[in-house]
Image: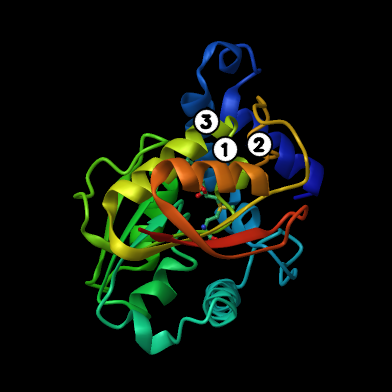
């Protein structure tokens, strides 16, 4: 299948001729779009770097999962977490996709609660992670962590998710939820896109941008201390916040 055919297939899977999606709200559009991406070729839309794709744009799934693990370990190292430090932790992952990094989080932490807005992503994640018994999944509304108890979590983690959220107020809502579910002294580790783009956009792929200033303001409002932040004005602005 050519790339063009693949993209056409996704568009038809995600939103028909586009007339319905014009009337859907942000969350419905995001859900339908990601369900469409997942039905078509989830790994293609999730993988970040490299291209171990065949001529049908299919990933070698072993490489796909090992990429997720390497990226996770790299970011944990960069923020000074030793892999052992997560040993007794309960981790929440926002936007788990098909479990590319959930799998590695489950190797490190005592339990993982992973959510996604797309039922189809979650269905495939459950298939890929079948037999791993310290992971629970739930479908998120697109802006909250409702099933997770307050003050019960040691780490909230998210990678390449907030960059696709169409309205930055929905991302702010996840920040408020992270503050609610984290224990005092626990950490929120995440990536956003900080390229100076729109704060609200109908385009799910390009989503909205979150600036360092947003993070500083939201942290002050929501009871977070900023421990580290890097990647200002890049696609990969990473931050580690502590609930205080
Ligand atoms: C590029 S994939 C990344 C998946 C995973 N974080 C990884 O690195 O392998 C983005 C994921 O975010 C999910 N997503 C998009 N908007 C979301 C939202 N508002 N709430 C929760 N998940 C969302 C998508 O369904 C998709 O599975």
> What mark, if any, has residue 165 been given in the picture?
1
Disc on res. 169: 3
- Indicate left or right for 30 with 18 as reference: left
Circles 2 and 3: CB distance less than 8 Å? Answer: no
Earlier in the chain: of badge 1 and badge 2, it is 1
Percent position (x, y) of residue 133? Answer: 22, 72
Is the residue under label 1 in contact with that under label 3 (CB below 8 Å)? no
Distance from mark 1 CB to nearest ligand 1 atom below 8 Å: yes
Q: How crowded is mark 2: few (under 14 residues within 10 Å), some or many (20 or more)?
A: many
Which element is circle 1 on? loop
The image quarter in which residue 208 lies = top right
How far is the residue under mark 2 from the one under mark 3? 10 Å
Mark 1 burial class by Cα count in 10 Å: few <14, some 14-19, many 20+: many
The tag earlier along the polypeptide, 2 or 3, is 3
Q: Which residue is drawn at 51% across and 16% down?
A: 24
Where disc 3 sits, the SS reads helix
**CB of mark 1 within 8 Å of CB of mark 2?**
yes
């Amino acid at each position: 299948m050519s790339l063009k055919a693949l993209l056409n297939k996704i568009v038809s899977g995600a939103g028909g001729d586009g007339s319905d999606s014009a009337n859907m709200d942000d969350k419905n559009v995001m859900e339908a779009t990601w369900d469409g991406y997942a039905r078509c070729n989830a790994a293609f839309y999730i993988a970040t770097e490299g291209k171990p794709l065949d001529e049908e744009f299919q990933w070698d799934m072993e490489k796909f999962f090992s990429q997720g693990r390497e990226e996770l370990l790299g970011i944990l190292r960069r923020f000074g977490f030793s892999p052992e430090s997560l040993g007794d932790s309960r981790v929440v992952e926002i936007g788990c996709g098909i479990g590319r990094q959930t799998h590695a989080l489950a190797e490190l932490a005592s339990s993982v609660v992973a959510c996604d807005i797309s039922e189809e992503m979650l269905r495939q994640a459950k298939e890929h992670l079948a037999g791993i018994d310290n992971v629970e999944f739930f479908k998120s509304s697109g802006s909250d962590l409702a099933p997770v108890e307050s003050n019960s979590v040691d780490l909230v983690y998210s990678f390449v998710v907030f960059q696709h959220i169409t309205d930055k107020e929905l991302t702010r809502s996840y920040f408020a939820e992270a503050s609610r579910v984290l224990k005092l002294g626990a950490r929120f580790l995440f990536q956003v896109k900080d390229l100076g783009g729109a704060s609200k956009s109908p385009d799910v792929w390009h989503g909205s941008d979150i600036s360092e200033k947003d993070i500083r303001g939201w942290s002050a409002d929501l009871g977070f201390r900023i421990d580290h932040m890097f990647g200002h004005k890049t696609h990969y602005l990473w931050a580690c916040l502590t609930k205080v």
